[in-house]
């Protein structure tokens, strides 16, 4: 009986297949081995053979590359299995050697050969096709090293900047590709070259054909139409090459590089008589500028590899700083840079938790956009949302630095985009909400970015966002004209102490920013006409008083019944003040008729009666620290305000409109109201209110000085000043302390506890009032020091 043959045939077939695959693998291995052997042999021959002239050597390596494409039959083998990388490296070395052997700026025959034979164009075509696999990576490396190692300017050559431009378009097309690292290195070297020679950027502003769908429009656009729209010239007036329009006809110029000369001439003639035929649906072709270098970098900022994204951000930083107006215009109008900045800001802000501890927002470490690396596991002070907070602050820092470095018109456009798309679109609804937790978190974030911003242009937009652009005097009926400003100032007197403190801190830091509109909008516009004063013409008997430093009609506080407790210990000798005084500020000359400084100083020092003072019982709480701090802070404020050209003396009363009704403004109204309740408010709130008022008092503007620091100013009926508010508080205090048993010992104990000199113990009655009295005493000493420092600076020649 015959045995079945089917299993034997199956085994034979499998054996044949295995044998065939083994032979193929053996052949591939032999080819690779032969390729490597050829490479080794080639290097040996080059080492032993007499050196050829550089040009012949250069041409040899280029021909070896081109012959590969003619002779090879396996186009799937990776480029690393070929000699192409070695030949490209040799070509680079030859070009560098040639440049080193020649005088600076002289182009050698090898470089002439590279330019004349459009080698970069050919390499671009090979890189685009990625043939053999990995060729795109090799081309990117060659371009990068060529631009980086050759010192002579290459980009002005059309046979360099044109293929560079085309290669740029290939970068960032797909994220997380194997060539991403080479792409960003190439783009960054191009950016660096443009930073060295900014005018070169005009070669990279391309005229693109932008199709807008429409109906009933002829679908052929003639050469005359294109010329009428100036589509063949750049902003620099340079003629555009026909090759740059080849994209409209669906042809790549590099595909035609090897055509015979007569065919190239025919192509040129055809392009000179260009007509564009549309698809069946009619469209209008509108020329517009394209900035592919920016677009590629924008794509790579979204790379999952953080290092690639940071390098892309660095490239954008270089491009926005280029001084060329055409590039700045194209950057903001023809790319999505503004959208990228603001959309990412918005998404990172929205990713934050609804509730974050304000202390965490304030104390999170300083953020540098290029060092946004955070490990939750390694952080001992981690809190929920820290990763998201750092990401947001890091990106805001990048936007701030980008706008700071940007060309002026680009900076304005970018800052306005942040204002409209992020501040108004995202932050304002959060700041205007009614949830106390939401208000606290959003205000803390606003406070943080106010502290963080350094760009003058972005700061200006932030100030307009917070305060509005109004500069005319406020009226009580129109204080809500700018809703966000009104809401934030109201929050300074919020039922929640946390919200009040955070908002006051935000305004305090805002006042320290170098922007004139901040102080003018909040305070100065309401003091411009000095209509808080009551004008009394001088009569002859008043002249002697003015010469002694007093203003006519003013009351000497030493004769006021409220200040009968003045003693020599409470006053400060002139010599002691003068020995601690700061250097002069020449921009603010002495005002004739100014109230004597010792009278002003003693007026503040003696406001709080002796019975309510406790500082003289504790060592180290004298005036010296306030003088030093006031001197340093006033010097800083003078430096900030120097360029604002403020007057050195108040506006003459004869020129002021004193008939107009006076309103101190919403901001000062809330601060004065808060100051009037200092005896009934928590200690932390009082510290913050007095801190903001002392900041305001430091500004070297004569109207601010007069309104906040001159006790002898003649207030118009119904008006109040900082001094008059404190006088009312002291009057209330003198009545209330009579009803508190053991007031002085309790006051001293509270002071020592606040200074950490006494351990915490049983709760003391009237603790809020006692803490308020201590803050009031210290505030009066601080105002006295500020008044003296400012007077001495303005009176010293």
Image: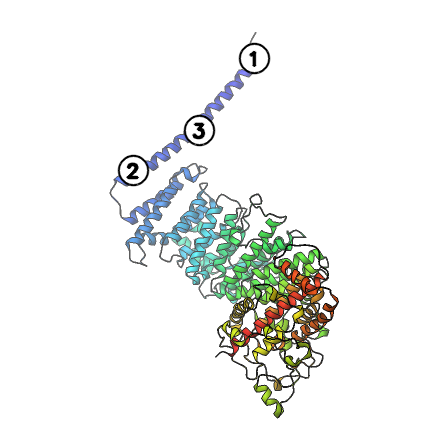
Q: How many numbered marks are there? A: 3
Q: Position of residue 755 (x, y in %)?
A: 61, 59
Disc 2 secondary structure class: helix
Q: Which residue lies at the image location 63% right of the left edge and 91% below the top edge? A: 539
Estimate how packed mark 2 is, as few (under 14), some (14 to 19) or many (20 or more) residues with alpha carbons within 10 Å. few
Asked if disc 1 and disc 2 are in contact, CB closer than 8 Å, the reply is no
Q: Is residue 705 visible?
A: no
Q: Is residue 411 above or below residue 43?
A: below
Disc 1 secondary structure class: loop
Quadrant of residue 515 in the image?
A: bottom right
Question: In front: mark 2 or mark 3?
Answer: 2
Q: Earlier in the sequence, mark 1 or mark 2?
A: 1
Q: Which residue lies at the image location 61% right of the left edge and 63% below the top edge? A: 419
For residue 44, the mark is: 2
Q: Which residue lies at the image location 58% right of the left edge and 53% below the top edge? A: 364
Badge 3 is on which residue? Answer: 25
Disc 3 secondary structure class: helix
Q: Is residue 780 above or below residue 313?
A: below
> In the picture provided, is 328 more to the left or to the right than 683?
left
Quadrant of residue 35 in the image?
A: top left
Q: Nearer the viewer, residue 402 or 340?
A: 402
Q: Nearer the viewer, residue 738 or 647?
A: 738
Question: In front: mark 3 or mark 1?
Answer: 3
> In the picture provided, is 494 more to the left or to the right than 469?
right
Q: CA distance from mark 2 to mark 3?
A: 28 Å
Asked if disc 2 and disc 3 are in contact, CB closer than 8 Å, the reply is no
Q: Nearer the viewer, residue 495 or 518?
A: 495
Badge 1 is on which residue? Answer: 4
Q: Earlier in the sequence, mark 3 or mark 1?
A: 1
Q: Position of residue 526 (x, y in %)?
A: 65, 76
Estimate how packed mark 1 is, as few (under 14), some (14 to 19) or many (20 or more) residues with alpha carbons within 10 Å. few
């Amino acid at each position: 009986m015959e045995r079945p043959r089917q299993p034997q045939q199956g085994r034979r077939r499998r054996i044949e297949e295995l044998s065939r695959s083994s032979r193929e693998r053996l052949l591939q291995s032999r080819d690779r081995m032969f390729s490597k052997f050829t490479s080794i042999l080639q290097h040996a021959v080059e080492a032993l053979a007499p050196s050829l002239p550089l040009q012949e050597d250069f041409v040899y390596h280029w021909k070896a590359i081109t012959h590969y494409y003619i002779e090879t039959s396996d186009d799937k083998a990776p480029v690393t299995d070929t000699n192409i990388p070695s030949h490209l490296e040799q070509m680079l070395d030859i070009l560098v050697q040639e440049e080193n052997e020649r005088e600076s700026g002289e182009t050698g025959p090898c470089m002439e050969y590279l330019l004349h034979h459009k080698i970069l164009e050919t390499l671009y075509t090979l890189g685009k096709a990625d043939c053999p696999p990995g060729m795109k990576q090799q081309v990117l490396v060659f371009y990068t090293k060529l631009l980086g190692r050759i010192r002579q300017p290459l980009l002005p050559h059309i046979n360099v900047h044109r293929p560079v431009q085309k290669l740029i378009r290939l970068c960032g097309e797909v994220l997380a590709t194997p060539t991403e690292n080479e792409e960003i290195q190439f783009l960054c070297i191009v950016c660096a070259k443009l930073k060295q020679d900014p005018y070169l950027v005009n070669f990279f502003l391309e005229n693109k054909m932008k199709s807008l769908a429409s109906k009933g429009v002829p679908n052929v656009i003639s050469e005359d139409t294109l010329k009428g729209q100036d589509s063949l010239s750049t902003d620099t007036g340079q003629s555009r090459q026909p090759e740059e329009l080849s994209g409209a006809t669906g042809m790549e110029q590099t595909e035609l590089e090897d055509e015979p000369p007569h065919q190239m001439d025919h192509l040129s003639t055809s392009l000179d008589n260009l007509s564009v035929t549309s698809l069946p649906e009619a469209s209008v072709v509108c020329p517009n500028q394209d900035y592919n270098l920016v677009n590629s970098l924008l794509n790579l900022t979204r790379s999952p590899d953080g290092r690639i994204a940071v390098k892309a951000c660095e490239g954008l930083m270089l491009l926005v700083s280029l001084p060329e107006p055409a590039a700045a215009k194209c950057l903001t109008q023809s790319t999505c840079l503004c959208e990228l900045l603001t959309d990412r800001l918005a998404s990172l802000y929205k990713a934050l938790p609804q509730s974050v501890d304000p202390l965490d927002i304030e104390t999170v470490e300083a953020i540098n956009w290029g060092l946004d690396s955070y490990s939750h596991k390694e952080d001992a002070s981690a809190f929920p949302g820290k990763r998201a907070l750092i990401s947001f602050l890091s990106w805001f820092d990048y936007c701030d630095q980008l706008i700071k470095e940007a060309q002026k018109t680009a900076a304005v456009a970018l800052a306005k985009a942040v204002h409209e798309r992020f501040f108004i679109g995202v932050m304002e609804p959060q700041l205007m909400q009614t949830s106390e937790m939401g208000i606290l978190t959003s205000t803390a974030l606003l406070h943080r970015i106010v502290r963080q911003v350094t760009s003058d242009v972005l700061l200006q937009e932030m100030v307009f966002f917070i305060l509005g652009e109004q500069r005319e005097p406020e009226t009580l009926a129109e204080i809500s004209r700018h809703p966000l400003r009104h809401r934030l100032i109201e929050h300074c007197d919020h039922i929640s102490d946390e919200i009040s403190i955070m908002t006051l801190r935000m305004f305090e830091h805002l006042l320290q920013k170098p922007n004139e509109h901040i102080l003018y909008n909040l305070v100065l516009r309401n003091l411009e006409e000095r209509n808080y004063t009551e004008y009394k013409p001088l009569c002859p008997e008043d002249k002697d008083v003015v010469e002694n430093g007093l203003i006519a009609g003013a009351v000497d506080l030493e004769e006021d019944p409220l200040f009968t407790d003045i003693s020599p210990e409470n006053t400060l000798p002139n010599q002691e003040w003068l020995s601690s005084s700061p250097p002069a500020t020449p921009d603010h000359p002495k005002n004739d008729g100014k109230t004597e400084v010792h009278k002003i100083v003693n007026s503040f020092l003696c406001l709080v009666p002796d019975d309510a003072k406790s500082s003289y019982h504790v060592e180290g709480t004298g005036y010296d620290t306030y003088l030093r701090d006031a001197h340093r802070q006033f010097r800083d404020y003078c430096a900030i305000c120097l360029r604002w050209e403020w007057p050195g003396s108040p506006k003459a009363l004869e020129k002021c409109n004193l008939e107009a009704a006076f309103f101190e403004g919403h901001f000062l109204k809330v601060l004065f109201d808060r100051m009037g309740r200092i005896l009934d408010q928590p200690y932390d709130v009082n510290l913050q209110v007095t801190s903001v008022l002392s900041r305001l008092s430091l500004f070297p503007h004569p109207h601010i000085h007069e309104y906040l620091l001159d006790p002898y100013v003649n207030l118009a009926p119904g008006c109040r000043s900082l001094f008059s508010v404190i006088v009312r508080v002291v009057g209330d205090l003198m009545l209330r302390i009579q009803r508190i048993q053991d007031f002085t010992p309790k006051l001293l104990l509270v002071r020592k506890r606040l200074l950490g000199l006494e351990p915490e113990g049983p709760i003391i009655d009237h603790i809020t009032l006692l803490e308020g009295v201590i803050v009031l005493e210290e505030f009066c000493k601080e105002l006295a020091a500020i008044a003296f420092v400012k007077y001495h600076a303005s009176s010293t020649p």
